[in-house]
Amino acid sequence: MTFHLETEIENADRIGIAGHVRPDGDCVGSLLAVYNYIHENFPDKDLHAFLEPIPDCFSFLTNADRIEEPGKPQASFDLFIVVDCGEPGRLGDAEEYLKGARTICIDHHLSNGDGFADLNYIVPDASSACELVYNLLPKEAISREIAECLYTGMVTDTGVFQYSSTHHSTMEAAGQLMDLGIDYPAIVDRVFNEKTFVQNRLMGLALMKAKLNETGLVISSVITTEDFRTCQADPMDTEGIVSQLRVTRGVQAAVFLHQNPDGTYKGSLRAKGNILNVAEIAQNFHGGGHAKAAGFRVDQDQDPDEVISAISQAVEEQLRNGGYY
């Protein structure tokens, strides 16, 4: 890290913030933490935040209703901050807004390398982008509203501090955020435990359709557009399915696919323990991410079952070679 976020903000008038497509809790939390920090401390700035529609479970975060959907033409930005995104293409329609702006990237994806922005703060083994935003912000400027955003991202990307990416620094940061008066049990309940009736129906169907590979080390499930219609659901209702598959006793990895309206599939990979690196596997399928959690894409001309089989073979190969570590 070779820059001061506060100085960069002070030197800009029009500021944009964006995160990756299909935003999760860490993406939403880190984006809104930065947004609220600027909004509270630099009220004169022309400030805009861009994301695709966020899951409803994150709508309680302060200023979530101010997030704009990217795609509309925008005047150029003096400063554009990218959070939780490993490459410009993962910004979707917001990628266009980078042009002509001084750019900052705050990220923890293994696939990001040296970064694509003018200024980069990338720590691949960090628990979350929210932990990195916490490190960048002046501690005296972290309000309860900002703390809620940061804590939400930390708990979602660490599985409530269960994943191996959780470090002493993560717990220390979380403790400081808790001391600011956030209702941390309610946050965990809202983003992890609460499910709508439709989400429960879809989860049940995904579990009914789940399969184990021949060795029992990989579990997978596929939800099609027909399944969505049956449950009167949509892709936003798939939150938590891959994590539920992952906790199956005896498995080392979980694979979950759900079909998009254009016939492609969005894939999610989760690993158990400290042996596998699913980000390395996802890179072979138009994807990437973290060692324990990654995403990928299945094209229209690809058979989902064949992709799952290839992923299972890649998992088995990593295990035969003693794991990634």
Image: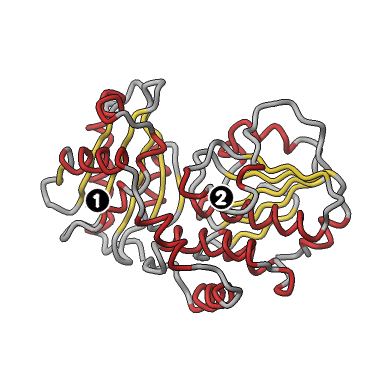
Answer with left or right where residue 182 lies relative to residue 196.
Answer: right
Kindly identify the amino acid type of the residue bearing the numbered disc 2.
Val
Residue toward you, 49 or 283 = 49
Quadrant that contains the N terminus = bottom right
Mark earlier in primary sequence (2, 1): 2
Q: Residues within 10 Å of mark 1 (few under 14, many from 20)?
A: many
Camera-side mark, 2 or 1:
2
Asked which secondary structure carries label 2, the reply is helix
Q: Pinpoint residue 174: horizontal percent, then vertical percent.
A: 53, 73
Kindly identify the amino acid type of the residue bearing the numbered disc 1.
Leu
Q: Pinpoint residue 134: horizontal percent, then vertical percent.
A: 63, 67
Q: Pinpoint residue 135: horizontal percent, then vertical percent.
A: 65, 69
Q: Residues within 10 Å of mark 2 (few under 14, many from 20)?
A: many
User: Disc 2 marks which residue?
Assistant: 28
- Residue, x 52% and y 65% (percent of image)? 126
Asked which secondary structure carries label 1, the reply is helix
Residue 245 image label: 1
- Residue, x 43% and y 56% (percent of image)? 190
Q: Quadrant of residue 273?
A: bottom left
Answer with left or right where residue 31 lies relative to residue 235.
Answer: right
Q: Is residue 27 above or below residue 121?
A: above
Q: Is residue 112 above or below residue 310?
A: below
Residue toward you, 149 or 113 = 149
Give the distance between the C-alpha atoms of the residues marked 2 and 1, in whole angstroms. 24 Å
Q: Quadrant of residue 40?
A: bottom right
Quadrant that contains the C terminus = bottom left
